[in-house]
Amino acid sequence: MGYYGRQVLPRVINRMCGLSALNPLRTRVCAGLAGSVIEVGFGSGLNIPFYPADVTQVAAVEPSDVGWKLASARVASSPVPVTRSGLDGQSLPFTDDSYDAALSTWTLCTVPDAAVALAELRRVLKPGGKLHFLEHGLAPDERVRRWQRRFDPLQQRVAGGCHFTRPIVDLLTQAGFTISELDVFYEPGPKFAGADSLGVAISP
Ligand SMILES: C[S@@+](CC[C@H](N)C(=O)[O-])C[C@H]1O[C@@H](n2cnc3c(N)ncnc32)[C@H](O)[C@@H]1O
């Protein structure tokens, strides 16, 4: 990864993903998290203020050193202990059935192989453990999908491998999760970039 990916992009993501307009979505996706939580694609820790009081510890999985550094003030002031515990969602250094819950926000778009990352989350979640997800992906409307396919190659280049066209709900169900809550909607702004799925998926 070059200078842009290492140094610039994590700062851009911190700004863009830190917009206060996204706070209501973070509140919704974090609601109901409890116990030991693994957060994949932790970024700069923008979900920390939204962890419910029932969360006892968070294992942060994040490859970007700059992202982790940008998170430092939030981590230091977090009422919940947050530890950087892994670098790649596709290979989690945890034993099977070790977490009560998982959190992923706008991350499955970027992990190189989302199916592998979801298989890993399934492995480390306890049976019945809940994955809270908020992801952008393939739009429900064909007209929007056409724009997503057009812009996808550019997006992958400028946004660190981020895809517009991943079918989030299909990926979750193919990984063996059962969706128990789901809201599919467009964020304000260009629809091709903000076709979101927010919900909870249960590990078998
Ligand atoms: C768009 S950002 C979202 C950050 C954060 N989840 C948020 O909501 O602000 C995507 C994040 O996924 C991380 N990421 C990329 N590849 C990853 C991988 N293989 N495993 C875990 N995280 C990864 C990126 O470094 C980045 O922090």
Image: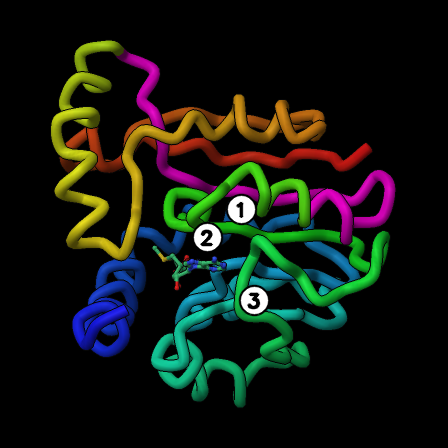
Instruction: Indicate yes or no: mark 2 CB to ligand 1 under 8 Å.
Output: yes
**3 and 1 marks in contact (CB < 8 Å):** no
Colour basis: rainbow
Residue 154 highlighted magenta (yes or no): no
Instruction: Indicate yes or no: mark 3 CB to ligand 1 under 8 Å.
Output: yes
The image quarter in which residue 160 lies: bottom left
**1 and 2 marks in contact (CB < 8 Å):** yes
Neighbour class for label 1 at 10 Å: few (<14), some, many (≥20)? many
Question: Residue sitting at 35 percent across and 80 percent down?
Answer: 66
Compared across the picture, whether 161 is left or right of 84 comes to left
Compared across the picture, whether 92 is left or right of 94 comes to left
For label 1, the residue is: 29
For label 3, the residue is: 61
Q: Which mark is residue 26?
A: 2
The image quarter in which residue 150 lies: top left
Boundaries of the magenta span = 121-141
Per the image, label 1 sits on a secondary structure element best described as helix
Compared across the picture, whether 1 is left or right of 35 comes to left
Image coordinates for residue 108, horizontal then vertical, percent: 46, 44
**Sequence-first tag of 3 and 2:** 2
Judging depth in this view, the residue of 188 and 72 nearest the camera is 72
Q: Is residue 25 above or below residue 70?
A: above
